[in-house]
Image (cartoon, grey):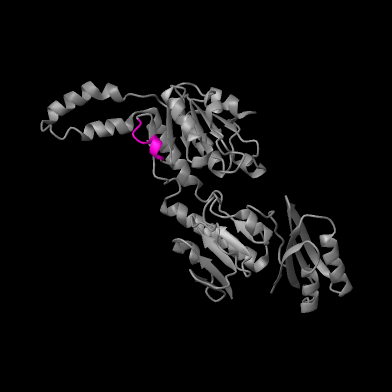
Amino acid sequence: MYKVRTYNQISSKGLDRFPRDSYEIASEFAQPDAFMLRSHKLHGEEIPNSLVAVARAGAGVNNIPVADYSAQGVVVFNTPGANANAVKELVAASLLLGSRDIIGGINYAQSLTSMTDAGEMSKLLEKEKKRFAGNELQGKTLGVVGLGAIGANVANMALELGMEVIGYDPAISVEAAWQLSSNIGKMDNLQSLLARADYVTLHVPAIDATRHMINAETLRCFKPDAKLLNFAREEIVDTAALVAALENKQLGGYIADFPTPDLLGRDDVILTPHIGASTQEAEENCAIMAADQLMEFLENGNIKNSVNFPPTAMARSAGYRITFSNNNVPKVLGNVLSILADSDNNVIDLVNKSRNDIAYNIIDVEQQPSAEIIAAIAAVDGVIRLRVLN
């Protein structure tokens, strides 16, 4: 029986994926096999010896100390793309809000509570509507920084709005590239994209390389009337430099999902309360993907959408399955195979993958390995975590 400890409120659509005859789901387990969470911060929390996997129902994993989990051979999953449509739709709304003073017009109309004559109100609105005029998106250039699942969706959506779209992503995956329209221009560097775009939208993860990617230097590359959208992570933008750029008219406006006190009350800033992925559908999609990935790993050892382990999959065959992670150094796999050979246990199939300092292996063997063989494999220098799957 697998035990999954949940944090936060996980959508029932995801939790219902777990068969109750082989899974126990609860918010408290002394020795869980897996964690499933959304925004709960795991920093500083003890890692149970029984834990083999963590699944975050969302894209970012900055609430998880990934390096600590990697050191103990714990696979950390996320759910890229599950909330992409929700974020894309909010970006679409934000582009429209940024191109025309829709919010100002709404607030003005709602302020006319003292007027009782509909005819007079109509005349006044006709006179004042020019105050809220803006520009159309069609024909304008959108720069998309980060072309993963969300960035690709946003880029393709903007093409449908009649915008010219340019993108920059030095780490784009083959899978993400296939999702992009051939009409999207690929830029060689960030500065070139910023100089060309009327609107710039950020869709990169919050890592050391992207922290304050938008700073005093890069802000000088923007067109003076350009609008910057941030529905990725707060840390990507240097807020102090952003405010200075707005004050100096180096930037036309900022639209973001991450309010901070120094951004409030500005006419050139539109803020939403971190609602990018807060739709019922997105939460359900994330929970379903997280649950499916956990089950596939717990039951079969296969890995998809891990942030610290390589993608690894091998179809189940007859026999018994061994999986193990190890430091990505020579001879570890060879030593394990020698132990199996010395015990006359034939290898039916195997796959070996690596990612940075971690290697991961799936081995199907003909005979059930004895406790002595498992102990010998676990004792091989470099092996981090070993599992035998029924």
Visible residue check, residue 40: yes
Whether residue 128 is situated above or below residue 210 in the rendered picture: above
Quarter occupied by residue 117: top left
Near-viewer residue (161 or 265):
265
The N terminus: image quadrant:
bottom right
Q: Residue 196 location in percent, x, y?
A: 54, 23
Residue 216 relative to residue 349: left or right: left
Q: Is residue 261 magenta?
A: yes
Find residue 321 and report its image quarter.
Answer: bottom right
Question: For residue 93, what is the image quadrant?
Answer: top left
The answer to whether residue 268 is above or below residue 31 is above
Count the labels in the image. Answer: 0
Indicate the quadrant containing the C terminus: top left, top right, bottom left or bottom right.
bottom right
Question: Magenta part of the protein: which range?
Answer: 260-266
Is residue 25 positioned above or below 225 on the image?
below
Q: Determine the residue located farthest toward the left in the rendered image.
A: 116
Q: Is residue 82 magenta?
A: no
Is 157 or 383 nearer to us in this picture? 383
Name the residue rendered at 61%, 63% in the picture: 53
Q: Is residue 327 left or right of residue 295?
A: right
